[in-house]
């Protein structure tokens, strides 16, 4: 299905920084954030045929330095923009954390506007910089009525991804972003977004009511004795285990994880990053069924990083254990 962008609709471009807003600094010897939103828009004259553009310079940070609080504030800003009549929103930021920020925004956003995250793999000083093309495709998507009600989207390389599925799969390639478990939900073709897989919006997570909790990820590795687990009981409010395969850890981890699960939510995800954590296929000590019986919560199809964000959001909302379990159950 497809729909032409509305040239009369206003799309707000919100900038957070990142490679897309970087140029090479002779003084620093490398790329640093320097471009404003106006600079980004000026580099894409074709935008005038896609939508009326407004710009908000919201942050000027590398993607690795954004925080959960930044994204909560961003969603608040988007809600105000929607109330003021904006027809779509594009967020530009660094690709280091884009899959996480878009997912967290998707957890909180309650509206119907097309909200599209984009970025660049090559900074503006490099030949073949991909930022301008990505901004154009993102604006064309945000201006389209077909993109309404689909939740937060990610557009790079003319691919349209659902935030819940997208992952950065390569450190440098301009085709770094993919949705390995689901594929893109559409593409931008000749300036027109074509949506061929309408994803169902999930219920949003309650708004934060307490200070952002500390939630960390611990990864299972060959021969690890789990010493990192010993320091977590009094320092974090939630934990995600990036386990082997379908949800397995070394036997030496089991008793410590069981003890931790009595004091905080401990979520069992897979370090593989694609495919689900299982529930009942294996039965040895340290297997997924053993760990779930010890009180861990299965992450379903969420990778460890997105599982951490879902857990963090619910802890910040002071959700009950039952509510947290239910939230992860919908991800199976």
Image (cartoon, helix red, strand yellow):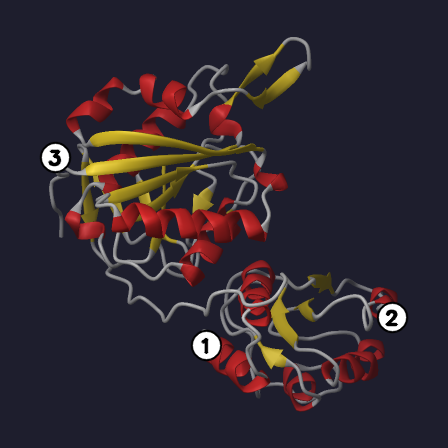
Q: Which residue is drawn at 34% across and 52% down?
A: 79
Direction from residue 189 to residue 80 in the image, left or right: right
Residue 142, quarter of the rendered image: top left
Q: Nearer the viewer, residue 312 or 278?
A: 312
Camera-nearest label, 3 or 1: 3
Please give the name of the residue rendered at 84% of the width and 68% of the height, measured from the top-left corner: 226
> Can residue 177 be seen from the camera position used here?
yes
In the rendered structure, find residue 8 and report the number of the disc placed on it. 3
Residue visible at 21% across and 45% down in the picture: 85
Element marked by disc 1: loop
Q: Looking at the picture, does residue 116 appear above or below residue 253?
A: above
Please tell me in which quadrant of the rendered image residue 269 appears.
Answer: bottom right
Q: How far apart are marks 3 and 1 (CA)?
A: 41 Å
The residue that mark 2 highlights is 230
Q: In the displayed structure, would residue 316 be above or below residue 81? A: below
Badge 2 or badge 1: first in the primary sequence: 2
Front-most of 249 and 132? 132
Mark 2 touching mark 3, by CB under 8 A?
no
Q: Find out whether the residues at labels 2 and 1 contact each other: C-beta distance under 8 Å.
A: no
What's the distance in space between the residues labelled 2 and 3, CA to CA? 58 Å
The residue beneath circle 1 is 332
Q: Identify the residue at image location x=48%, y=20%.
A: 35
3D distance between C-alphas at marks 2 and 1: 30 Å
The one of 28 and 59 positioned closer to us in this rendering: 59
In this rendering, position of residue 331 left or right of residue 172: left
Q: Is residue 148 left or right of residue 226?
A: left
Residue 319 pos. (x, y %): 55, 78
Tag 2, which secondary structure? Answer: helix
């Amino acid at each position: 299905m497809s729909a032409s962008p509305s040239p009369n609709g206003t799309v707000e471009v919100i900038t957070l920084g990142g490679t897309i807003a970087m140029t090479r600094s002779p003084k620093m010897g490398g790329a640093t954030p320097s471009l404003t939103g106006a600079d980004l828009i000026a580099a894409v004259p074709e935008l005038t045929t896609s939508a009326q553009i407004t710009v908000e310079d919201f942050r000027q940070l590398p993607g690795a330095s954004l925080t959960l609080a930044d994204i909560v504030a961003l969603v608040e800003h988007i809600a105000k923009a929607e109330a003021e009549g904006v027809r779509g929103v594009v967020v530009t930021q660094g690709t280091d954390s884009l899959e996480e920020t878009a997912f967290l925004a998707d957890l909180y956003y309650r509206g119907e506007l097309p909200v599209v995250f984009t970025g660049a793999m090559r900074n503006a000083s490099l030949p073949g910089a991909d930022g301008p093309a990505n901004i154009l495709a993102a604006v064309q998507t945000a201006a389209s009525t077909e993109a309404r009600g689909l939740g937060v989207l990610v557009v790079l390389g003319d691919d349209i991804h659902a935030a819940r599925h997208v992952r950065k799969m390569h450190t440098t390639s301009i085709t770094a972003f993919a949705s390995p478990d689901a594929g893109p939900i559409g593409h931008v073709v000749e300036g027109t977004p074509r949506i061929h897989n309408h994803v169902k919006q999930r219920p949003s997570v309650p708004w934060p009511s307490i200070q952002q909790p500390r939630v960390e990820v611990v990864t299972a590795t060959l021969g690890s004795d789990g010493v990192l687990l010993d320091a977590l009981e009094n320092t974090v409010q939630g934990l995600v285990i990036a386990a082997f395969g379908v949800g397995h850890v070394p036997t030496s981890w089991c008793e410590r994880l069981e003890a931790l699960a009595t004091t905080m939510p401990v979520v069992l995800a897979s370090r593989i990053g694609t495919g689900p954590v299982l529930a009942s296929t294996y039965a040895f000590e340290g297997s997924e069924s053993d760990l779930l019986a010890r009180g861990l919560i299965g992450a379903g199809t969420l990778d460890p990083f997105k599982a951490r964000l879902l857990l963090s959001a619910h802890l910040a909302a002071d959700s009950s254990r039952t509510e947290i379990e239910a939230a992860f159950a919908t991800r199976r």
